[in-house]
Amino acid sequence: MSSASLPVINIGICGLGTVGQGVWKHIERSRADLESRLGAKLVLARASVRDLKKKRAVKLPASKLTTDPMSIATDPDIQIVCELIGGTTLAKDVTLAALRAGKTVVSANKALICDHGPEVFAAARKHGGHFFFEASVAGGIPIIKSLREGLVANRFGRIYGILNGTCNYILTRMDREGLAYPQILGEAKQLGYAEADESLDVEGWDTAHKASILAYLAHGTWVSTKQMLVEGITRITQADLEFARDNGYSIKLLAVILRDFKTGELNVAVYPALLPQSLVLANVHEVYNGVAVSGDVVGETVYIGRGAGQDATASAVISDIADAATLLVRGNAPLPEVNLPKLPLAKPENLRSRYYLRLEVKDEAGVLAKISGVTAKLDVSIASVLQRPGETPGAASLILSTHESNEKAIRATVARLKRLNCVVADPVLLRIVNF
Amino acid sequence: MSSASLPVINIGICGLGTVGQGVWKHIERSRADLESRLGAKLVLARASVRDLKKKRAVKLPASKLTTDPMSIATDPDIQIVCELIGGTTLAKDVTLAALRAGKTVVSANKALICDHGPEVFAAARKHGGHFFFEASVAGGIPIIKSLREGLVANRFGRIYGILNGTCNYILTRMDREGLAYPQILGEAKQLGYAEADESLDVEGWDTAHKASILAYLAHGTWVSTKQMLVEGITRITQADLEFARDNGYSIKLLAVILRDFKTGELNVAVYPALLPQSLVLANVHEVYNGVAVSGDVVGETVYIGRGAGQDATASAVISDIADAATLLVRGNAPLPEVNLPKLPLAKPENLRSRYYLRLEVKDEAGVLAKISGVTAKLDVSIASVLQRPGETPGAASLILSTHESNEKAIRATVARLKRLNCVVADPVLLRIVNF
């Protein structure tokens, strides 16, 4: 079939920022290959921007630009709408309008999916369109396709991953260079590896959004970020990194999705953890993401790649566009759905881990006795104790590691320890991965 | 939709061996989840075996068993045929018969695809069926789906991987236990990690079949194993493993698929290589497979998982069955094709690498001068020399590493060195990965 006789797919890009321009650029660059593979002509029909006058790396005629993304969402000539606006207000309106018009929406918007997933998926189903979101989690890694299709034979006992490139970059540089969190954060911002407002990333919420999406795909159960334990990396210091290194661990911010096949309970959590260096993910550094998926048929599989940035995200968006185009050319039939019984969430007393606890304490006699009195009372068994100079003058850092304990006991322990006079700052609690 | 009203997909399994039984077992086990996701009832209709009386772990009624796989391939009630017979004779007949009847064939048969890929794909295309083969390369890892769909935006400059679990298991144990190849091979056979006739695995041909499939998927060009450099692991000794370890490398049997964007040339090769331990794949051990894919948009992504065995292979076969069922329920439309211009193969003089060369030499004066005379004459520049006790009494091992050189020069060098009187055994040539 000559290119001229191929069916035409019109694509609209809402939000021509970094990712949108990457999508445009790479489709133009690989157009011949893509069209030959897909058997369809891909036309970049329109794009919406906030400022028509702004200079962009991608050149396109003024006639293709608009400041009104809704006009793209409802344009009858456009079949695929890429929602790259971000946020959960205008982006939601645009997504729902396009889906209600029977279009296919390709999205990188994890917050939107996490907050409004059921509504968005229902709109796609009802109006015969599709909603694709490979770019929303670990951009460069086709993890959503792998979970949904490649590993469909499996039930997933454990999925854990490094899903935020900013946090991984900061932790990697802190570990390598021995510098403090605020200094590395500042440099990461200058280099464009961290946002001006970094809180979504470093407090764990971005990772939590992605964890919610993976949990839904794997288990068909929506877990909101409010139902998760979500902890960030802002309180990690050189004391923690040194202890980890000296004991054969790396500290990584993890999303952890556990399904207990005995109780049927699901647990989704985000926390910085000490990961044994023998695990592949402990050696995934810089801005890279990595996901380890344990399936009951396949065993453990691991996926590593860039999680964000113009090109990795564009690669994922274009793969969704290709899937959407394939479907459109062939009649746009519905796809398999995640349609599984809803799982109950795990209770804290059913979650077991080893823990790392750093306490800033007054450097005086009797402190260890008081602290170990508390842990003994609450049934948390100490595996090791290390005392080192504290973060502030006159204080000492007391680093405890525990034997396996449960989440309820450790939380009660931390609450009790905080109230001790000899403890001068909020304890830092990290989990020690023993899977 | 209640399960009773779902459309029914009848599946036939040709070859109810280890993998076939795994497929049957895991479909039975996860039937509810699978059917709910796919919106179709999966019926295991018939299976072919060589011996009707043989005891099997999977119980099924005698009425479902036949000794004639062709009767399954041509059964009008069956829509999906799993060809798990192996080999390229009966398996080919069964595959082509099923495809000519318009059915979808799911295959784990890398040799068949490698030897008869174009014919098989053409038959699927012509008769409106499909041919799926996720299980043929790195079973547990959805690498075929990732290359074909997830990374469709990319052109692939470099794909390299550990694709044979038997070789990786042998090399891992030799390295860890300091034992010789024949001893570990014997134990691997006892444990079922190596076939009775191990030559396909350890001589590199199994890896070459898989490399051919990945090269076709990535570049649309069929490269037969005859057109590749294919080297195995049988001559690797503790001297090689020790040198590698002492210098920060692991030795792995690699498939390497390189595309030079400047010359347009493609090179596909299989060889044992010294891989820097800083690379993720250098730390993929035991029976695990790993593939590193460099795309021009996404950068490098890495995939790790079990490559073979009943369960990993069954996981891949079932994912293909799920894709086939999804298509069948929705009208079985054609899928995108790899339809790219054929690439020329690279000439040896255009291939550059660093090399490791172990020479067994007479332990006498003047040997090094003779050898370095040869390398200098052929323009191969030596980076390091190490002499150690030889593999046989009275001989010495001379281990050379070279600066970057080209394949033509190194092959000429090895040929010339072999003819020297002081060289008492065929030289062992390994590549040192510098990508």
Image: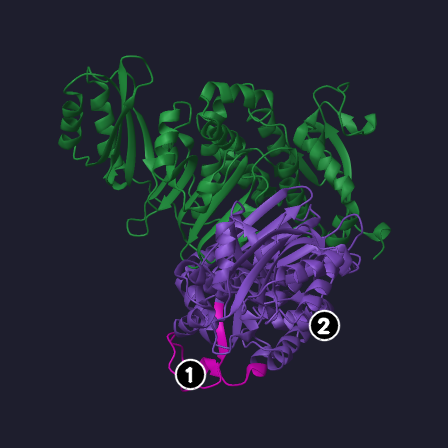
Chain colours: A green, B purple
10 Å crowding of disc 2: few (<14), some (14-19), many (20+) = few
Name which quarter of the figure residue B270 lies in. Answer: bottom right
Asked if residue B60 is among those painted magenta in the image, a careful observer would answer yes
CA separation in Å, label 2 and label 1: 34 Å
Is residue B378 visible from the viewing direction of this image?
no
Residue B93 on image: x %, y %: 64, 80
Asked if the residue under mark 1 is in contact with the one under mark 2, i.e. CB atoms within 8 Å, the reply is no
Discs 2 and 1 lie in a common subunit: yes
Residue B242 on image: x %, y %: 48, 56
Which residue in the structure is indicated by mark 1? Answer: B62
Compared across the picture, whether B228 is left or right of A227 comes to right
The residue lying at 68 percent from left, 27 percent from top is: A17
Q: Nearer the viewer, residue B152 or B234?
A: B234
Q: Earlier in the sequence, mark 2 or mark 1?
A: 1
Q: Which residues are magenta?
A: B43-71
Q: Secondary structure at mark 1?
A: helix
Asked if residue A12 is among those painted magenta in the image, a careful observer would answer no
